[in-house]
Image: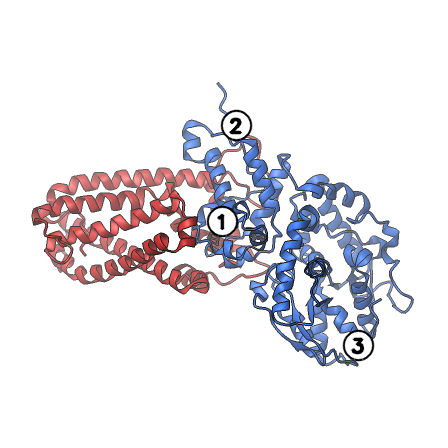
Chain colours: A red, B blue
Amino acid sequence: MVYFSGLSDALRMTFVQIMILSAIAIVIFLYGMIGNLQKWGTGVTGYALEPKEGQKGSAIRFLKTWWAQVTAESHHSGKPILEILILDILFQRRILKRSGLRWFMHICIFAGWMSLFALSGLMFSVEMTEMIGIKLPFTAAVFREWLAIPNYIFGYILLIGVIIAVIRRLFVSEVRQASIMYDWILLAGVFIITISGFIADGIRTGFIWSFGLDPSAAPPAALFHSIISLLFCIAYIPYSKYIHVIATPLAILANKGGE
Amino acid sequence: MAKKAPSIDTKNLTAVQLMELDSCTRCGECVKWCPTYAASGQNPGLAPRDKILRWREFMNKSYGIKAKLFGPTEIPQSELEEFKDDVHSCTTCGICATVCESGINTVELWEALRANLVKKGIGPYGKQNAFPKVIGQYHNPYMKDQKDRLNWVPADVKIEDKADIVYFTGCTAGYNQLALAFATSRVLNKLGIKFAMLGEEEWCCGSALIRTGQAHINDVPRQLAKHNVEALKKKGAKKVLYACAGCFRASKVDWPRLLGEELPFEVIHVAEFLAGLIKEDKVKWVKPINKTVTYHDPCHLGRHVGVFDAPRYVLSHIPGVKFVEMENSKEFQRCCGAGGGVKAGLPDLALGVAESRVKDAVEINADILSSCCPFCKRNLSDGRDSLKVDIVVEDVIEMVAEALGLETS
Ligand code: SF4
Ligand code: SF4
């Protein structure tokens, strides 16, 4: 699966649009993120304290309080930060301890998502480098071909995770009954991004996911995928359940890996 | 026109705790384990996940992006009252923190939310609001005379005036559950451990006030902690022994936090102390206890502080004891139902949880359901009586006394 970044010859027309969209997505993200940091920063800095009269939420207060907790000594758990980063955040052992299936699902989504995000970023920077005239030992087109296989692999890893998540939410009664709109939006977003990525690439290559569509539909399909990726992956994070991708690692670090 | 004020404030809620609300992935693991949610007949409001979601919504309505742009949305008082009821229907057992995939420190969060609401004049729950006045005035929650603190001490027990080791009895063992006080003091005497006690200078540890969000009222818990630490210092304490898990947790975790400094002595549970003596081969047993015994980890000793092995070590060294583990044990233990002010505020809920725990012990055919806390013993005994099952509920220290040939009455 090739992530469209808007710079290839065939799709050159969309470059400006993509740049504008990216900028808008980032601005929306930053606005929301600052809003969240300020909301968290309405809290107090330590045990049993009270905010000062008329005190406003402050992102700095949040960051200071968080850092103080990360570096404070703990009377109980207290694991080294590196261990927490690797085992609790990257490997997600807290989920593994509770449910093998849920861990597999989550790690597929996490690994697939993050890798595709990183690969797209990489592709984008190579194309930008080429655009501004810096010579690389390879062309952006060649680089795109190199990324094709890793893109496919992580794309399918993500797809497996997403399919498990959808099946769980639809068919496991305990999960379905407890689901609220907040959960459905997250899942629907990931599902649409993943499937649209496969379809956009399928149309371009005429392979598996093309559904017989004319290759001329490739640019708009890729554009659609890019837009919703930018909106869901970046812009919508601070306003939705996606915020957990930022807040959960921060909570795990603050609580030294948790109980 | 002046901007509307938010319906909630952030008193007692740290910036990190507010962030934790957004870190909940709604995985539902905590719901599966919560003992009060189960004992309430799965009342959705009691589920930890639901409480987190509700307060997150309250925060967004009050301080979120929309609130910033268009002003806060009012939260009806009835919703806050309902939330108060639900957040107090929690024993602060901490299993939700243990299983939480996002590593949220839920116990601290529940206690902070309770305190936040109490400061707003919402809560605590039922009879819990009598605690600050009673404990502030009597220095114990049972309205007993402080002069009677040592009334239970039998003639055969020798207490030093000053010693390196001080036994902090706790209000429950000192006034009501005397068997534990008899057992602890006689066991220490028998093992040649010289110890002192605070007597009428022993004040309540403050746990009930802190757990129910009332720590700020007249500053009572801090005064209790300050007084106790000073009194312990005067006795020459280097090690302070506790047989009550609630007092132990309060001293170990809450006192240093209230006082803003480390304690000048070591805080040890008697089970840990005895395990040390057994390891040094200093305990000579005189009588076997030929029974099948299981052990219930008090939340405040186990999950809250991490003491899981010492009581098991002690039990497994008592001659004759066949030790069996319940399915939910150690960090995944099921709460007895008494903690967090639930026994005083919601006795029916406490009983329901206790019954589930007693059933765990009955299922594995234990003769004795042991624990290391007089409060657990009391509630588990109530659960046993209500189920009308034939099982003995006994403290580990009382069993040690028996195996050393000592009386506990
Ligand atoms: S601390 Fe225990 S009783 Fe309270 S919400 Fe968590 S699991 Fe339930
Ligand atoms: S276990 Fe933690 S992350 Fe999962 S629903 Fe409960 S509070 Fe949220």
Kind of element beneath mark 3: loop
Q: Quadrant of the N terminus of chain A?
A: bottom left
Are the residues under marks 3 and 1 on the same chain? yes
Q: Which of label 1 and label 2 is nearer to you?
A: 1
Q: Is residue A223 left or right of residue A117?
A: left
Disc 1 Cβ-to-ligand 2 distance below 8 Å: yes
Amino acid type of disc 2?
Answer: Ala
Q: Return the residue nearer the eye: B267 or A245.
A: A245
Q: Which residue is mark 3?
A: B404
Measured from the top left, where is residue B10 in percent x and y? 55, 38
Residue B49 tag number: 1
Q: CA distance from mark 1 to mark 2?
A: 27 Å
Amino acid type of disc 3?
Answer: Leu
Q: Return the residue nearer the eye: B50 or A259.
A: B50
Q: Is residue B347 left or right of residue A163?
A: right
Q: Is residue B402 left or right of residue A253?
A: right
Q: Could you tell me which chain the residue with mark 2 belongs to?
A: B
Q: Could you tell me which chain the residue with mark 3 belongs to?
A: B
Disc 3 Cβ-to-ligand 1 distance below 8 Å: no
Q: Return the residue nearer the eye: B320 or A257.
A: B320
> Is residue A231 among what the camera can see?
yes
Compare marks 1 and 2 and give the one earlier in the sequence.
2
Residue B5 tag number: 2
Kind of element beneath mark 1: helix
Q: Which of label 3 and label 2 is nearer to you?
A: 3
Q: CA distance from mark 3 to mark 1?
A: 47 Å
- Furthest toward the top, the residue is B1
Q: CA distance from mark 3 to mark 2?
A: 65 Å
Are the residues under marks 3 and 2 on the same chain? yes
> Is residue A64 among what the camera can see?
no
Answer few, some or many: residues within 10 Å of disc 3's Cα (few below 14, many 20 plus, some between 14 and 19).
many
Q: Could you tell me which chain the residue with mark 1 belongs to?
A: B
